[in-house]
Image (cartoon, helix red, strand yellow):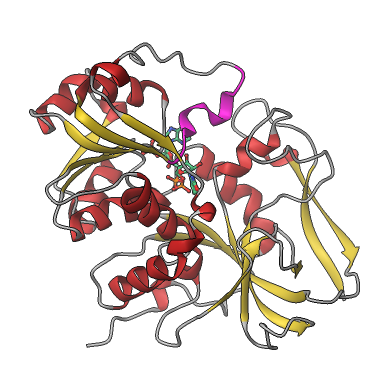
C-alpha cells in the first residue's frame, strides 16, 4: 500500500495555479506506539494553506518546496496503536492532502470524531467541523457575543462566515453579511436567513452601505477579510465594540503588499476590542461547539452549505476556485463518490 499525496511544486505569486502543485507516491511507515493510520475520506480546502505557500513568517511554518500540502482531513481508521481509536472509527486532524495519514497524539486537532449515523460525513469537515467550530468560538468566546448585538460578518457566504451569520441569528441577534456577488447576496438572505447583505464588489461606497444597515453602529464585527472592508468598518463600530479577528483573506494572495489600513486610530476612538484567535486553541469549547452545531444541522436550523469535488487530484483546482472567490459554503474534496455529502441528506420528517 502506498500513500498518494499532493505536494508544493513551486510558490505562487498571486492566485495559485495548477503548476504550483504536483502529486507523488510514497511508502507508508510502520505505526509507532500511540499512532493511528487512517485512510482519508474528506479533505478541507482552506484559505490558510495560501499563507503557508509563501516563504514568510506566519502562525504556521512555510511549506518547503516538495512538501505535503497541509490540511485538515477526516478518515477511517484502518490500523491503530492507540487505545482511544479502533478500526472503523473516524480520525480527524491537521494532516494533509494525502490518501493515508498517520495521526500522532500531538498532531493539531487530533480527534476521534463522534460521527452520527443520521448525518452525512462531509459536514464534519464544514459546518459541524472546524469551520463551524471557528465560527462558534469566534463569536461566543473571542467576540463575547451578547443578546441584542448588531452583527456584521465578512465573507458571509463562505465556510466560516455562513455559519457565523447563522449562529448570530439563532442567538436572536440581527446580522448583516458582506459578500462579493449578487448570487452570494441571494444565498445569505434567502437560504441562510441573514437580515441584510452588502455586495462590496458592486457598491460605490462601502462605508455608506454599512451606515445604511447600521445607523447606530456595529456591536460585533466577525472579521474574515481585512483590507478595505476592515478600514470601512472601524469608524462604524459602536463604543466598546468587539472584533474577533478570524482571518484577513483579502491579503493572502499578495502578502508582500498588504492593504494599508488608514483607520486604525478608530480602535482607540471607539475603544474597540480587536482580538485575533486560532480556533484550535479553544479546545475547552470543542465538545460544546460540536454538540450545538450538530443539533442545529440535524434539526434543520443551521444550513450546512458546501461545495464538494471528488478525488484527491481535484484538490488543487478546488483550492484555486476558493482563492479566486468563486466558491460558496465549505469547499471540500471527498476521496470518492461513496462518501456522503449534504446533497445526499434529507432532514427527518
Ligand atoms: N482563525 C481561525 O482559527 C480560522 C479558521 C478557519 C478559517 N479562518 C479564516 O477565516 C476566513 C474565511 O475562511 P473560509 O474557510 O470560511 O473561506 P471562505 O470564506 O469559504 O472562502 C473565501 C472567501 O473569501 C472572500 N474573499 C475576500 N477577499 C478575497 C480575496 N482577495 N481573494 C479571495 N477571496 C476573497 C471570497 O468571498 P466574497 O466573494 O464574498 O469576497 C471567498 O469566497 C479566512 O480568512 C480564513 O483564513 C480562520
User: Could you say where residue 119 lies in the image, as x and y percent from the top left?
Assistant: 41, 80
Quadrant showing the N terminus: bottom right
Left or right of 297? Residue 93 is right
* Of 281 and 13, the residue lying toward us: 281
Residue 168 as seen in the image, left or right of residue 306: left
Residue at point 37% right, 37% down?
223
Instruction: Give the residues drawn in magenta, as a range.
Output: 246-256
Q: Does the magenta segment cover residue 249?
A: yes
Image spot of residue 47 (x, y percent) = 54, 43
When the figure is inspected, residue 127 is found, relative to residue 219, above or below; the finding is below
The one of 286 and 185 positioned closer to us in this rendering: 286
Of the pair 283 and 251, the residue shown nearer to us: 283
Which residue is at a point 70% across and 58% down the rendered structure image? 97
x, y percent for residue 319:
58, 47
Q: Quadrant of residue 264?
A: top left
Residue that appears at 74% across and 83% down? 78
Amino acid at each position: 500500500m502506498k500513500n498518494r499525496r499532493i505536494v508544493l511544486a513551486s510558490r505562487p505569486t498571486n492566485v495559485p495555479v495548477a503548476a504550483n502543485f504536483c502529486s507523488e507516491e510514497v511508502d507508508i511507515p510502520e505505526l509507532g506506539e500511540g499512532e493511528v493510520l487512517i485512510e482519508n475520506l474528506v479533505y478541507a480546502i482552506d484559505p490558510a494553506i495560501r499563507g503557508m505557500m509563501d516563504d514568510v513568517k506566519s502562525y504556521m511554518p512555510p511549506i518547503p518546496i516538495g512538501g505535503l500540502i497541509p490540511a485538515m482531513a477526516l478518515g477511517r481508521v484502518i490500523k491503530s496503536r492507540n487505545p482511544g481509536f479502533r478500526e472503523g472509527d473516524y480520525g480527524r486532524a491537521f494532516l494533509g492532502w494525502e490518501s493515508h495519514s498517520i495521526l500522532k497524539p500531538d498532531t493539531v486537532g487530533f480527534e476521534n470524531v463522534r460521527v452520527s449515523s443520521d448525518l452525512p460525513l462531509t459536514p464534519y469537515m464544514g459546518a459541524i467541523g472546524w469551520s463551524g467550530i471557528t465560527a462558534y468560538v469566534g463569536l461566543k468566546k473571542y467576540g463575547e457575543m451578547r443578546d441584542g448585538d448588531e452583527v456584521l460578518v465578512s465573507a458571509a457566504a463562505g465556510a466560516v462566515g455562513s455559519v457565523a451569520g447563522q449562529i448570530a441569528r439563532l442567538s436572536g441577534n440581527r446580522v448583516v453579511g458582506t459578500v462579493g456577488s449578487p448570487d452570494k447576496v441571494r444565498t445569505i438572505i434567502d437560504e441562510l436567513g441573514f437580515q441584510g447583505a452588502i455586495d462590496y464588489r458592486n457598491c460605490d461606497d462601502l462605508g455608506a452601505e454599512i451606515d445604511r444597515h447600521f445607523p447606530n453602529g456595529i456591536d460585533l464585527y466577525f472579521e474574515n477579510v481585512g483590507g478595505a472592508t476592515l478600514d470601512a468598518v472601524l469608524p462604524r463600530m459602536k463604543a466598546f465594540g468587539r472584533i474577533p479577528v478570524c482571518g484577513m483573506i483579502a491579503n493572502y494572495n499578495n502578502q508582500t503588499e498588504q492593504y494599508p489600513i488608514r483607520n486604525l486610530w478608530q480602535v482607540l476612538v471607539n475603544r474597540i476590542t480587536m482580538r485575533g484567535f486560532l480556533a484550535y486553541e479553544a479546545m475547552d469549547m470543542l465538545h460544546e461547539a460540536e454538540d450545538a452545531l450538530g443539533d442545529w444541522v440535524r434539526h434543520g436550523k443551521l444550513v450546512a452549505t458546501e461545495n464538494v469535488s471528488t478525488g484527491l487530484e481535484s484538490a488543487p483546482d478546488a483550492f484555486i476556485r476558493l482563492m479566486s472567490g468563486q466558491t460558496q459554503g465549505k469547499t471540500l474534496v471527498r476521496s470518492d463518490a461513496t462518501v456522503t455529502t449534504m446533497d445526499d441528506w434529507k432532514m427527518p420528517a
